[in-house]
Image: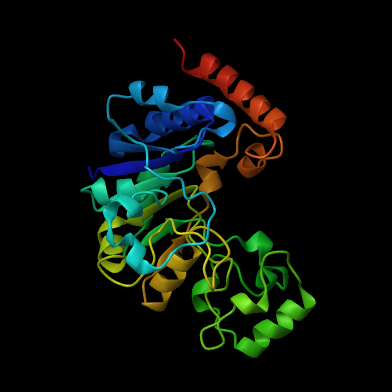
Amino acid sequence: MEKVDVIINVYGKPYQTLCTLKSLTEHCGSHIDMIYFINERDSLFHDDSMWLARCFPNIDPYIPPENHGFEPRKEKEYYDDKIHRWCIKYQYGVEKSDKKYVFITHNDVLYTGDIIGDMLFQIGDSVGIGQIGQCWNCPANKANVCDGNKMENYRPTYEEILGIMDVYKTARTSIENVDKEYPMPLPECRLNEFACLINREITVKETWPNRDSPLFGTLNGKHGVDMGCEWFRSMVLKGYKFKDYDIYKTSQHGYFSPINCGLMAQKDEDLYRQCETAANYYYLEHYDS
């Protein structure tokens, strides 16, 4: 059976993280070798999570020397030094792993089935498998002309995108983000990193400092509006394929949040504590025996 390594970036949320890893190993443990546990240098609401590294025998913990947060990415030359590269989300695990594939997860996902086994079975010749696109934010999806399944074959002209964006306005996508020569992938297109499997060997070969594609976890950029958009765009334009996958068959992102949005819990401490309490109860009920 093929083994993969898991990469998880942790910013607070210790009990949600614990439930994420417990449920993932419960359903997918036979596929997992190492877990690269990357703990952010800053602690969300002073909530330490490093104690979790002692809860699993196969964890490799790492604390980056800097916290890049949501700063726009710097230029390629900055990442010639691996210490700077390893400050980018997930990159420590990408470079430390020796597996063909790595599974990347957020720390607020509850797994309900063998998502890794299913993704390994379906990935084929694709460089990544997972939910494609933040389509809920994209004008082309609102116009009903594109989604994660259609993206690969959707080839609009720049003028067509201008027309769509004039009718279907969104908060994050502006025409300045759209490339005139190659409009696709659009700014919201990406492989959503909250639960995805990527071909690590191809990714390392194509990304900084080996070649010219941005790192998987880089943020923002000229033609992207979120983490991984520039990596995804670069890989697509090089001809690599991605497979859209319904992650909700085997997982639930933001499971412990009443509004199903993990990011909001990072901004609202009351909501954060509510999510952590729910995760603690879930852990005690399902795993504390």
Residue 279: x and y in percent read 58, 24
Q: Is residue 106 above or below residue 198?
A: above
Q: Quadrant of the N terminus?
A: top left
Q: Is residue 219 above or below residue 258?
A: below
Task: State how many labels appear.
Answer: 0
Q: Quadrant of the C terminus?
A: top left
Q: Residue at x 40, y 68 (%)?
A: 75
Q: Residue furthest top?
A: 289
Q: Is residue 60 left or right of residue 145?
A: left
Residue 58: x and y in percent read 27, 29
Give the quadrant of residue 238: bottom left
Q: Is residue 138 left or right of residue 29?
A: right
Q: How is the image coloured?
A: rainbow
Q: Is residue 253 left or right of residue 239?
A: right
Give the quadrant of residue 9: top left
Using the rendered image of the protein, determine whether residue 107 is visible from the camera's viewpoint.
yes
Give the quadrant of residue 163: bottom right
Q: Residue furthest right?
A: 167
Residue 68: x and y in percent read 47, 50
Depth check: give the residue in front, 35 or 248: 35
Depth check: give the residue in front, 59 or 80: 80
Q: Residue at x 55, y 60 (%)?
A: 226
Q: Residue at x 69, y 84 (%)?
A: 162
Q: Is residue 106 above or below residue 18?
A: below
Using the rendered image of the protein, determine whether residue 121 is visible from the camera's viewpoint.
no
Residue 121: x and y in percent read 34, 52
